[in-house]
Amino acid sequence: MVLGELIQKLERVNNFFRMKRSILPFFFLLCFFAKAQQTFWLTDPQATYKQAQEYYQKQYYSLAYPIFKELEQDQIARPQLYESFNYENVHYYNLVCSLNQDDSTAVNPAEVFIERDDNAARTEMLAYHLAEFHFRHGNYDAALKLYESSGIDNLNNDEIANLKFHKGYAYFIKKNFELAKPLFDAIRQLPKDAHYIDANYYFGYICFYQKKYTEAYTAFSVVENNPKYDNIVPYYIANIYLVQNQKEKAISYAAAKLASGNQYYAQELKQLVGHAYYEEKNFSKAQPYLESYVNSSKTVSRLDLFELSYCYYQAQNYNKAIDGFKQLGGKEDSLAQNAMYLLGDSYLKTGQKANARNAFLFCASNSSYPVQKEISEFHYAKLSYELGYPDVALSEFRSFLQQYPNSTYTPEARELLLNVLANTSNYKDALALMDSVKNPSSSAQQLKARILYGRATELVNDGMLPNAAELLDRASREPNNTELLPFINFWKGEIAYRTNRLDDAIPYFIEYLKTPAVRGEVNPVNAKYDLGYCYLKKENYKEALSYFSQIARNPGINANPLEQDAFIRNADCYYMNRDFKTAVPMYSKVLEYSWPASDYATFQKAMVAGVNNSSEKINLMNGLIRSIPDLIW
């Protein structure tokens, strides 16, 4: 086989493996040349060297590599055949070819050559090839150092472009975007360069990172439809539309790319579309995108979770909204406060008042949104009232009214506070608050009679009867006093009786007995007892008897003091009506039962006896004196 045919065959092999930089051609060539052409190399090194140089100039490094390696080894073994050779030239070519064949054993010799050789052109060229070796192996720091020392004077245009792109990429990987950007930009000016598409992508990425969106869009537009980047770049372009306030364009563009499928940033695009719809308050369209993004992501931001939960809230899917909002508490920021506010409202809408109360408490403790804080404080107080925490409700309503005197919730807060005060029998404060309300609502009006009556009874107990009577008069004029009217009549009668206004007391008691409600001291027995005394004092013994007899017609030995007194007053009425036959047995029963009023009964019997028998009257009086010696001074 002649050398020319051999070379042609090797070139075809090299073309097959060149892009992969496979080491296989190297072994293939070593074996082939060792067997077929060893004698030729040994006998004609000049021709071999010349042929290897031709391969080198054409950048057929896989073909030149075994030849230069063999020449360098033979030069050492048989120096007499290589007297006309420059050893450094062969060594240099061998190192370049070795590095381009990814022969790591050439790294250290190449570093030594660069350090010691005084040929600037060769050292700069070798620095470039060594930099490329390190670049291919991801040693970007070493590559950058060598790129800086390689220069471009001895490189061809392709190598210069290659250097700039790889150098820019190394800076990019190191996140030194300021140095990477102009290098990529230089390659962008060469549409026919092999790195043109890649350079546009990385340049666009850096501009996007630097928020220079117009430049980024120009670069991304170049690679948008390139198969290498058509599933990556749409995410950035959609974001650019969004930040440039082209929301409709961003949404339609991103949605179309999602529909086409195979997007590397599919989830991020869903997040983008969902967020854009959310910003436009189109929550129904935002929900499926945000839902897909949140459900398929390992970690999501609190904002994304909030937006999805808010979409559920707007769709009245409160259970899902609750699940989301619950995860957003525990912070002191505005998002946490907003979430707790909406969580409380969601609980309210699902009838979970206890949970709503807790959520509003958390919201009220955060001051990020003053309006939500105000509303939450009101709801916390209101729910405390509704759930049976009167002490908390009382303090919270008072605090709310002090902080927000002009709030839209102030009227309702006052009314609820009235209820709390009334339910806790704090009628004094309730009355003061009620009198401060200029235009009370119907619900507040319904409380007026109750509060007036309650405060009046407190004044009665304190002995402030005129003040109590005034409040009872006001209560009697209230239109919503139907249930309280019997009690009002009783106390008005009681006050009139205690102030000796008997003619006023009688009709109030009689009116009370028409609908005799019972509450504590207010009961028919007490009303009849007071009526009996009213008539007794008016010397209307017949009427007095009619009421006293209803209380104690035939009491037993253990009758209570009121019954005992009513029974004696019955006897007195008979006595005053001169029905002594009825009165005397009644007084005798008092003596028989040894009630505390026995002395009085004895006296009354003596008075009756004296009417017909003076000696009996004297005996009874003497007995009374003996039993009560202090009766005589």
Image: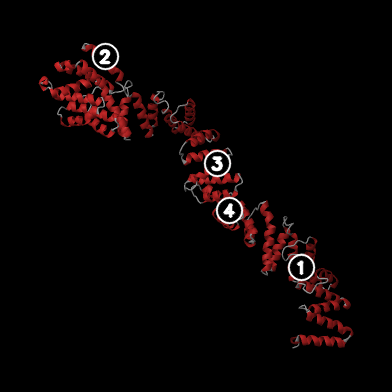
Q: Residue at x 38, y 29 (%)?
A: 216
Whole-Å distance between the Cαs marked 4 and 2? 93 Å
Residue 584: horizontal and vertical position, in percent? 85, 79
> Which secondary structure, mark 4?
helix
Viewer-closest of 114 and 479: 114
Whole-Å distance between the Cαs marked 2 and 3? 72 Å
What residue did someone put label 1 on?
526
The answer to whether marks 4 and 2 mark residues whose Cβ atoms lie closer than 8 Å is no
Whole-Å distance between the Cαs marked 3 and 4? 24 Å
- Earlier-in-chain disc, 4 versus 2: 2
Viewer-closest of 89 and 403: 89
In the image, what residue type sits under mark 1?
Asn
Can you see residue 58? no
Mark 2 Cα within 10 Å, few/some/many (few <14, many 20+)? few
Residue 471: horizontal and vertical position, in percent? 69, 63
- Earlier-in-chain disc, 3 versus 4: 3
Question: Which quadrant of the figure has residue 447?
Answer: bottom right
- Earlier-in-chain disc, 2 versus 3: 2
Whole-Å distance between the Cαs marked 1 and 3? 61 Å
The quarter of the image holding the N terminus is top left
The answer to whether marks 3 and 4 mark residues whose Cβ atoms lie closer than 8 Å is no
Q: Nearer the viewer, mark 4 or mark 2?
A: 2
> Which secondary structure, mark 2?
helix
What residue did someone put label 3 on?
321
What residue did someone put label 4 on?
381
Could you say which disc has been placed on residue 9 in the image? 2
> Which secondary structure, mark 3?
helix
Q: Nearer the viewer, mark 2 or mark 3?
A: 2
